[in-house]
Image (cartoon, helix red, strand yellow):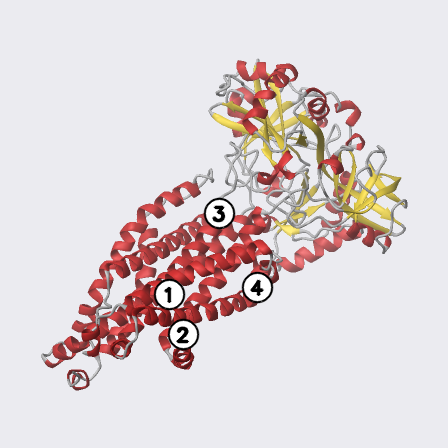
Amino acid sequence: MLSHIKSRIPRLLRSPISWVQLIGFAVAIATATILYLTAMFELSFDSFHTNKERIGLLYMRSEERGAIISNSSMAPPLAPLVSKELPEVEASTRVLNAQMMLRHGDKEIASELKYVDASFLKIFSFPMDQGNETALDNQDGLVINEAMAESLFGSKQVLGKAVELNINGNWESRIITGVSSVNPRNSSISFSSLMRFEQSPNYKELENDWSYKNHAVYVKLKAQSIDAAGFQKATVAFINQHEKVAIEKLKRDGAKADANGAYLSLRILPLKDVHLSDIGKGEVETSKFPWILLVISGLILFIAGSNFVNLSLASAMTRIKEIGTRKTIGGSTFQLFMQFWMESAFICVLSLLLGLALASLLLPEYNATLNYQFKIAQLFSSLNISLFLAAFLLLTIITGGYPALRMANVNIINSLKGKSSVKSTYLQNSLTVLQFSIAMILCIATVIISYQLHYLSNRPLGFNKTEVISIPIGQGIDANLAIERMRNTLAAYPWVKSVSASDINLGRGRDGSTSTSRFGFDQDGTEIVTNYLTIDYDYLKTLGIKLLAGRDFDRQHKTDENAVLINKEMADLLGGPEKALNSTLEMDNNPTIVGIVDNFHFHDLKREVGPLTMGLPIGGFDLSYIFVRIHSSNLQQSLKQVEDTWKSINPKASIAASYLDENTQNLYNNDRRIAKIVIAGASVAIAISCLGLFALTLLLINGKIKEIGIRKVLGSSITNIILLLSKNFLMLIGLAFLISTPIAWLLMTRWLEAFAFRIAIQWWMFALAGGIALGFAMLTVAWQTFKAARVNPASTLKEN
């Protein structure tokens, strides 16, 4: 048997059907491999921490005005009291995001700083190159990572050396007490420097303030795993004691209690879920992105396996007499089964090798497109090898075993006559319907996702994002003075129309920031929660924001330092524009509302426009971004001139400027990443499904070759024959469309629910996706049937 198989290998490699099997399976394996690497990376976040099962992120939950509010921003007193008063908690740490300029000699570098507690390095397992987990026990301690050390000192051996920090505009010296390794890419917490939380701005004033919430709190529990429900119940008394004021406000304003009767609850999110969670946008929900990738890869492998079966059965049509002859001379069914199965296994092994090679070739482009750093060597861990071998053996047994069993059981008499009992079966048709159902679901998803992203890119945002340059100001510079210098310098350019600034960017700029500020206050006995923007003069003019009532800030009105602008949403909360205009807000300094602007999107379009208050930079609020409106025919040249002007004012500027339309597009990079993967999956699914259709077409034509000849002799045209042979496939694809449509509608409706502003799913989206799948399928069928219909009847009818 082995000698026979060896002699079959050259013929297998010369067979077109073998190559179709090989390529189809290899493409599926390559695609599944890349998607598997992506999913495993997304699921591996924070897995390097020793006590990962015991660490969680705290968040508050309430139900207000019919909406579930989940917020991970905590008050400064909470973390110390959690460690002190909750027996379930072993340790806690506050984590506040900031930026800090570091200087050594003539080198100044912006650092991604985290203000944390001394327990931070004890809770988390960030690897330390120098120093240890006690590096922050001293309140003046400073930890930097090795990349920052290399940039500042040209060496990683910097423990005990001094470095200067720009704190509130003044350079202060600190001693480096620890050097960490560069953050692992699969860490949800990233930093280039760490300082004690007690060193954060205004700490002394805010230390016991429960109303000011601006940082995250992580805890390590004493238990070996996190019981989220148990933790929530254990913290009820704690929250009732320390958040009395907040709870009373919630009750007064009609908030709804949860199942445990709590109006405000303290909850915990396991560390493994933090990366994929969406805290702050309603209920805490873990992203299903990695599981979607695994499902797509599994479906593609299923399609490829189905095709392998169909192609194996199709190839049996050319070997019917060989099977009969081998049975006649004594070949057993088992021997034939093993022969055919080993031939299939040989093709599967080649497919695996080719698929891994193809994945290795595609990974660099995939990494560059989606910002990953995958290597094929990552597959060769003991777990991955075990999973791959198990999956591969299962696929080989199923895809090779079933066709081998069917072919080995062919009737001897029929096979010697050239008649086959290996015909198109219910199973084969079912597999084809399933393949095209899956492919059409992916096609429909591609159309809807692409249309939604197009809608997000083109929906009016309430401000004019075109021809506006955004510049991050950074640390270590007097922002107000720098803005005035920019305004005065750029006034010499006729194409510069206006200059303004804000503490918050619109969209996601080159610095990666998308943050906003929120606070609450009582107004006429009702708690009002508003977003807050600190803006400079000419903000409305520069951004093209419409003023509905009142006036803009005016340099001639000295009282505007204690005035605010609000948006229409905020005005509606205050009783309407007429009542709100010129009224006083019962917040710090009691500012007067001098103007009401139309609603504009300062968040992404996944969220509704919320209440917004805007004020001038007083009381410690800093401006962080400069906006320059231009009118130019050469946008790149104008951007360079503005950047050069900024660098002449701030030579240490390290983050490039960008256009606002680019920033707003950046908000949906993750959705575009999903779209690209779904499009690739749909393309592969369609291609492999068409290979399956190729197999069924071949089966049908081989079974009807004499009928085709007779029909041609009797006068049937090529068109009639093509229609006759294609009718069954049209029915199968039509059935696949009927199955896929409701499933795709349900899945995409769920996906669109994540967007506050979304498209309506329309019939033409299904028609377009179905048409694409049908078009490729019919091209596959038509080509085979056209070739069969053109064969000379004499060559087919003369055979026995």
In the rendered structure, the answer to whether residue 563 lies left or right of residue 249 reads: right
Q: CA distance from mark 3 to mark 2?
A: 32 Å
Secondary structure of the residue carrying tag 1 is helix
**Residue to which mark 2 is pinned:** 19
Residue 688 percent coordinates (x, y): 38, 64
Q: Amino acid at mark 2?
A: Trp
Whether residue 683 is visible here, answered yes or no, is no
Give above or below for 613 relative to 5. above
Residue contact at pointers 1 and 2, CB within 8 angstroms: no
**Residue to which mark 4 is pinned:** 365
Secondary structure of the residue carrying tag 4 is helix
Residue 591 percent coordinates (x, y): 66, 22
Q: CA distance from mark 1 to mark 4?
A: 33 Å
Q: CA distance from mark 1 to mark 3?
A: 28 Å
Secondary structure of the residue carrying tag 2 is helix
Residue contact at pointers 3 and 2, CB within 8 angstroms: no
Q: CA distance from mark 4 to mark 3?
A: 23 Å
Does label 4 or label 3 sit earlier along the sequence? Answer: 3
Does label 1 or label 2 sit earlier along the sequence? Answer: 2
**Residue to which mark 3 is pinned:** 291
Does label 3 or label 2 sit earlier along the sequence? Answer: 2
Q: CA distance from mark 1 to mark 2?
A: 15 Å
In the rendered structure, the answer to whether residue 658 lies left or right of residue 312 reads: right
Does label 1 or label 3 sit earlier along the sequence? Answer: 3
In the rendered structure, the answer to whether residue 788 lies left or right of residue 605 reads: left
Residue contact at pointers 1 and 4, CB within 8 angstroms: no
